[in-house]
Amino acid sequence: MECIYTKSKALSAVPTSFCPGCMHGTAIKLIAEVSEELGIENDLVVVAPIGCAVFMGAFVEFDSFGSPHGRPGATGTGFKRSNPDVPLILYQGDGDCASIGLAETMHAANRGENFTVVMINNQVYGMTGGQAAPTTLPGQKTTTSPAGRAIEGTGYPIRLAELIAELKAPKYVTRQSLHTPKNVLAAKKAIKKALEIQINEGGYSFVELMSACPTNWKIDPKDAPKYMEDVVLKEFPVGDLKG
Amino acid sequence: MECIYTKSKALSAVPTSFCPGCMHGTAIKLIAEVSEELGIENDLVVVAPIGCAVFMGAFVEFDSFGSPHGRPGATGTGFKRSNPDVPLILYQGDGDCASIGLAETMHAANRGENFTVVMINNQVYGMTGGQAAPTTLPGQKTTTSPAGRAIEGTGYPIRLAELIAELKAPKYVTRQSLHTPKNVLAAKKAIKKALEIQINEGGYSFVELMSACPTNWKIDPKDAPKYMEDVVLKEFPVGDLKG
Amino acid sequence: MENTYLLAGFGGQGVQTLGQLLTYAATDAEKYATYLPAYGGEMRGGTSNCTVKISDEPIGSPAARSYNYVVVMNLPSYNAFKGKVKEGGTLFVNSDLITDAQADEGVKLVEVPLMEMAKEAGSPVVTNVVMFGLLCAYAGDIDLDVAKGTMLQKMAHKEKFIPVNTKAFELGVAKGQEAK
Amino acid sequence: MENTYLLAGFGGQGVQTLGQLLTYAATDAEKYATYLPAYGGEMRGGTSNCTVKISDEPIGSPAARSYNYVVVMNLPSYNAFKGKVKEGGTLFVNSDLITDAQADEGVKLVEVPLMEMAKEAGSPVVTNVVMFGLLCAYAGDIDLDVAKGTMLQKMAHKEKFIPVNTKAFELGVAKGQEAK
Amino acid sequence: MSEKVVKKGNEAICEAAIRAGCRFFSGYPITPQTTATEYLSWRMPEAGGVFVQAESEVSAINMVAGSAMAGTRAMTATSGPGLSLMTETLSVMAGTRLPAVIVNIQRAGAGIGAITGNQSDFYMVTKTLGHGGLTGLVYGPESIQESIDIMYESWDLAEKYRTPVIIMTDGVMGQMMEQVEMPDYKEAPDLSDQPYVAGKRKDGRKKHLIMDSPYFGPMPTQNDNLEYNYAEYEKVYESWEENEVRYEEYMMEDAEYLIVAWGTSARVAKTAIRHLREQGIKVGLFRPITLVPFPKKQLQAIDKNKIKGILTVEMSVPSQFHNEVVHYIDKDIKVEKYRRGGGNMVLDEEIEECVKKML
Amino acid sequence: MSEKVVKKGNEAICEAAIRAGCRFFSGYPITPQTTATEYLSWRMPEAGGVFVQAESEVSAINMVAGSAMAGTRAMTATSGPGLSLMTETLSVMAGTRLPAVIVNIQRAGAGIGAITGNQSDFYMVTKTLGHGGLTGLVYGPESIQESIDIMYESWDLAEKYRTPVIIMTDGVMGQMMEQVEMPDYKEAPDLSDQPYVAGKRKDGRKKHLIMDSPYFGPMPTQNDNLEYNYAEYEKVYESWEENEVRYEEYMMEDAEYLIVAWGTSARVAKTAIRHLREQGIKVGLFRPITLVPFPKKQLQAIDKNKIKGILTVEMSVPSQFHNEVVHYIDKDIKVEKYRRGGGNMVLDEEIEECVKKML
Amino acid sequence: MAKVEIDVNYCKGCGLCFGVCPKNILKASEDVNAKGYNYAEQIDAEKCTACKLCAIMCPDAAISVYK
Amino acid sequence: MAKVEIDVNYCKGCGLCFGVCPKNILKASEDVNAKGYNYAEQIDAEKCTACKLCAIMCPDAAISVYK
Ligand SMILES: Cc1ncc(C[n+]2csc(CCOP(=O)(O)OP(=O)(O)O)c2C)c(N)n1
Ligand SMILES: Cc1ncc(C[n+]2csc(CCOP(=O)(O)OP(=O)(O)O)c2C)c(N)n1
Ligand code: SF4
Ligand code: SF4
Ligand code: SF4
Ligand code: SF4
């Protein structure tokens, strides 16, 4: 019998420490697979900032470095400018990328830095225990919006991909989801396209991935895909926004 | 003879310390005039952050407070939430508002804070001596882009009004210019509209004002309006973007 | 008299609630009591644990090098904390998940079929109430009536939860008295 | 021997260039020299000024409480700095903009029609070169040939600027020698 | 009415803030501070105040500054990395002399470090609040109860001196639970006439121009005013050394050995002292409660003829508090240290052992 | 080849960086640092390096960290408010042990303050680089020439010890111009195998997982490793006190009075000393060049039998350097202070007067 | 012939694979693994078509598919 | 009848008013004010129509217009 699917060799021999059903695992798996397919698993470098993303380095076989919360746009810029030939992914949470790090994220995009941002949009602050994120849905209950996110005073979810697509420099901006096998495959294609742009022609790319944080959603992981389809993707439609 | 135009009583008895031809003066004059027309010259509060804006407090008769560079979005939020009935203007430079303060600016807009941002877009860092700003035009020479702003590596000018107009919460977003009397009058109308929204229905408004910094443009102030018309407004078209 | 407790298990097993219950009950019993959870990111996918101290005097550190009573509700907790029992102390293991448990020398081992007992009480989620009853009865820090009152006040927000929690508590107490 | 200079005027009058010229020239003349500009936001719309020290020994502070030579090129500078001259020092005023200038007791006053002299040299912008020649001749810190060489190297990037700058320098030197 | 409750440290200190009249909180989640933010996300609105989850700590502290300039009793809470991000604005607030309260729930280490309790931000707050060398009042309570009491008083002090107040707790104190007594509700004063407050202008009041630097003063130039005013601030700080120093002497009268510790470490040390006393060893504790002003004179007064040795106890590696204490202790007294780092707790058993080694 | 040039301080120190092999600069404009950023905006690309004007100081220092993790000699420059914003990442860099150079061109005051030269960031950098209590090497040159020399050496030290290096100049040193000697160009070493460098992986090299906290180490838990590694760092810092302390003794042999000062203040003091010596007054100068490690032992060794009095000179109000120096001076020696704040310069005339008052 | 291999040590029993299996032959085990998770099991192995959907969906890369 | 009053102490001689005057009757003075600026002057005052354009344009609020 032939093995037609198994764990990527770019994944390390340690099971992830993510919660059951956490789609951080899915995203990292896809990055590993793409790196193998592009033959860059020894070259790729990943920035893994604070947030549940920070654990990534332990689970992959390529080089990685940490970043203060929200600053991958800057650490990534410094790194890539000094190592222009090294393929680079900024692997960020939505809190990291769109809240504390919004200026770094937008300015790196605006400068057209030659790297790829993969942002995990799980609509909460996972690592710190489920506080509201800029992406939290209207009415969604979190530990800092116990009555549900109110429009009055906290506004609407930030759709970062749309904002970045407004800028001129970025070459590829897309939102994908990880809640069905079909979407997972589309997400993988998007990551691959982004890396190919980076390697072949150079330029900034942004891949937002809709993900589940069952722990902080207080939802059975099994029920997450349906909730994502029915509720989350209504606010965050998937598809290419640019490029 | 009847006086049909003179210095607003909301301006203090001190001539401004701005450079000759600096349109910070124009903007402050307009804010003073509007405050008088709305009868709020004793109520209005202005946040005047670092940048040439910081001098404003000395030239107006209403209360004002400073802010660390880039942070009016936050200081303004704290102030207004605690004083919801006090009309508030955040008077910011483009470096302040769109560079170091981008996260504070965007998040305040996204939350729909009930205040008005007046941003002076002069395409440079005025106070510190003419360094490049996020708004610097492609090819524009500044003290940190002596060969002209390069797209490669620094990207395109950030059009902040357009980005803010992408958000759902803001009620009124506009770009006006100060380079002709007609435009000055339109700018005044925009400031007035913004304040009226703030006072009557409540909501966030953003008024970007195209201005000259002749000192750092190294241009005769007299020539600034033509340069603005011919070059600057091509990159930054005036008009309402939302509301 | 100061008694120290270390309670460990995985996420859903309610060890934090158990720790808080002990603290509330001890306070209601007019003792000094502290509760200190282990928390945060490093807990992800691992074990959850907390420490409780109950004393007649003001309490200094809410943690200790080793404890009088160590409760381990799953295997990783057993591996991590079985060495944390004070000499003369007791190690309580959830025998439904941990088979072949062994205690260090000088430490008493009490095996408790926690999940089974919870089921017997009427709900798989009341393992921590079983353990609460057991610890109250075994350690004798807290008057059992007070303990029961506190437990019902904190755990039985709805009337319908009273019987199963009461049953769980009583099963625990019985087991605790038996094991003493 | 250490001589200290304070040079002030408004933006376009080139006092910073003047200060730098003195520093370059003194260095070329193998002296120690420092230049320190006043800078930044507080200068906006006000005066521009700088200090220069020229010495045979290493220089400590590039600034001082008072100065041997104070040059004021406009009225606000005159008002701000006329009191900054050391006893026995000299105050140079631009008499085209400052009429009725007066020096403190013990201070010598030299009135210079700077703008007129610059025009005479052939360009209104060379006021600072006039002043440079004047100071070199008056203070005697810098050999005049060296000074002229430095000036031409720094100011006359294009050949066509040589005559007017030379003229300005020489007019300044003449005035300086006369005023000594 | 004051009441006894069993509460988490973070919730208790926040509740105390509300009872002290605090009506504005802005914070950004960070372990081990999160439970404070979570608590106030519902409790603050319930009390009629404003809760804002800021987009970052930079923003949070600036919101607090803004609210203080509206005349409101405002606060934030954070932990080390967040406190670092607040330094610019803390410095601005010290310069503007804005009253506000900042709680630092310390965790371990630089950068990510470890998220359990620690005392490794000692030097960060005691020497200067950011650039420029200004400071504020800094408290280091040892228990939830003491943190409540200090919090309850803090705005009164902040307003009296026009200064930010920093309260340094830690992950242990913040996350643990025990019984405490909550004070009564009190009203915040009307601050609308204060020169650092904008808006709500009463008839005839002149405009307020609030800046973070004293461009105002009796001197002819800005630089001179800045110098003059900072010298005045320094006098205020020096007056604290006379009037605001707080410390506890625990079993010190007959002590031959002394433990010097603050915060949670001091609390743990007390247990060790009781045990040592039971063994007939005469040990006492000197505990600074104010970290700024630091009880320098009191430390200098420790009598070498009475005290044979001193042990400092702190939860910080590298040493910080120890290094500071040594400066003030008579050189003839031997000072040893016991410390734990990395988010590990100091333990009373280990303190006992260290003291015994000194005998 | 080394060459003599007349240069502004800011440009000179940047040129020295380039000659030392620095190939990455990121900065955000702030007076009085702007001329450094402006100079490198063309000079760095000319030298084949990368210049990025960051969107803020937070971003600038993180870019530097990123570039350091690419194995490049990277630096930034800023002034007080910007340095405050950098503290979180400085702490992270100290924790990750990343070599890089940060120039702080000090200005006066908290917040806006005044933009002229000052020494009021002394405590901000000497006790801890942000939260968590770690530190780096800190230098306080007295002149443009010395700042060039230190800059030229700084990455060698940064890489040797895996530490950030902070060079503290000020607005005076940065904006003034004088003749200096520029060193030769040197090559940066190949750092690609260093454990803190990612990318450019050679065959067979294992992955590098670079984090700002030592999750790695011989201990069983993360907390224990953090504690262990921080204790190791502390040993490194202590080794600096043996091996890296720098200071200057100027006319000290026969001195009866001593001035203690650093940076620009020390430079000015030298003029005063020469004048005082001309008047027959025996004064000398002790000048710390390293602020971390601080020359504690050398200060402690000052002989009360030789020295009748000490005057500290600094450009900071409230006092900072003075307060630190006093800790180490024999209590029998009287220590007076002379200082200017608000961006005012200390003056040699005033130093002279202060010394004479002590006689 | 198709086969699915589930690595019991990687599986966290999240169940995401259950719902995507077109043959509905994945379910939670009665037993728990070392971490206490009820890991995934294949029942009716013969029905497996090696469509890979479960493996694609698994966040923990616990599933290998053979054909 | 129309009149324009230029406050010499406020005027910085930027010249922005010159270009907007439809009658082209504003120009720089020969004299400088205390700050050294060649302030604005109206020549041919009779031509002034009190259109206010100069005043609207002036950044320094130096111009008052009477009619
Ligand atoms: C400066 C700073 N502030 C706050 C934190 C605490 N913190 C750690 S992770 C995190 C948010 C994580 O959320 P997100 O980026 O969305 O990632 P997720 O964990 O949800 O994947 C926060 C606020 C920190 N480490 N540093
Ligand atoms: C934290 C911090 N960084 C940098 C500075 C220096 N600084 C003062 S004003 C300014 C930029 C001003 O530009 P802009 O906001 O566009 O206003 P303008 O002066 O052009 O009106 C900068 C960078 C500062 N004061 N604080
Ligand atoms: S907390 Fe949420 S984001 Fe973090 S590992 Fe768990 S499920 Fe994933
Ligand atoms: S520097 Fe530019 S923005 Fe600032 S006052 Fe002068 S002209 Fe206006
Ligand atoms: S999706 Fe993966 S981790 Fe989840 S139950 Fe299936 S095999 Fe296990
Ligand atoms: S626009 Fe105003 S400041 Fe400018 S020249 Fe005319 S009157 Fe003077």
Image: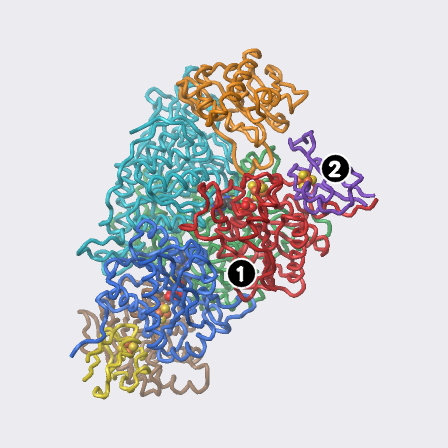
Chain colours: A red, B blue, C orange, D brown, E cyan, F green, G purple, H yellow
| Foreground residue among E22 and E318 | E22
SS at circle 1: helix
On the image, the x and y values in percent for residue F22 come to 55, 60
| Foreground residue among F341 and G56 | G56
- The reply to whether the residue tagged 1 has its Cβ within 8 angstroms of ligand 1 is no
On the image, the x and y values in percent for residue D17 come to 38, 74
On the image, the x and y values in percent for residue H2 come to 20, 83
Q: Which residue, given by chain and number where applicable, does mark 2 sit on?
A: G42
For mark 2, does the 10 Å Cα neighbourhood hold few (<14), some (14 to 19), or many (20 or more) residues?
A: some
For mark 1, does the 10 Å Cα neighbourhood hold few (<14), some (14 to 19), or many (20 or more) residues?
A: many
Q: Which mark is residue C175?
A: none
Q: Which residue, given by chain and number where applicable, does mark 1 sit on?
A: A164
- The reply to whether the residue tagged 2 has its Cβ within 8 angstroms of ligand 5 is no
Question: Farthest front residue?
Answer: C160
Amino acid marked by disc 2 = Gln
Question: At 34% from the left edge and 32% from the top edge, which residue is drawn?
Answer: E299
Depth check, mark 1 against mark 2: the one in front is 2
| Foreground residue among E31 and C137 | C137
The chain to which mark 1 is attached is A
Residue E159, located in which quarter of the rendered image?
top left
In the depicted structure, whether residue E178 falls above or below residue B145: above
Amino acid marked by disc 1 = Ile
In the depicted structure, whether residue C13 falls above or below residue F151: above
The chain to which mark 2 is attached is G
On the image, the x and y values in percent for residue E118 come to 47, 35
| F107 with respect to A9 (left or right) | left
Q: Are marks 1 and 2 on the same chain?
A: no
Res D83 visible: yes
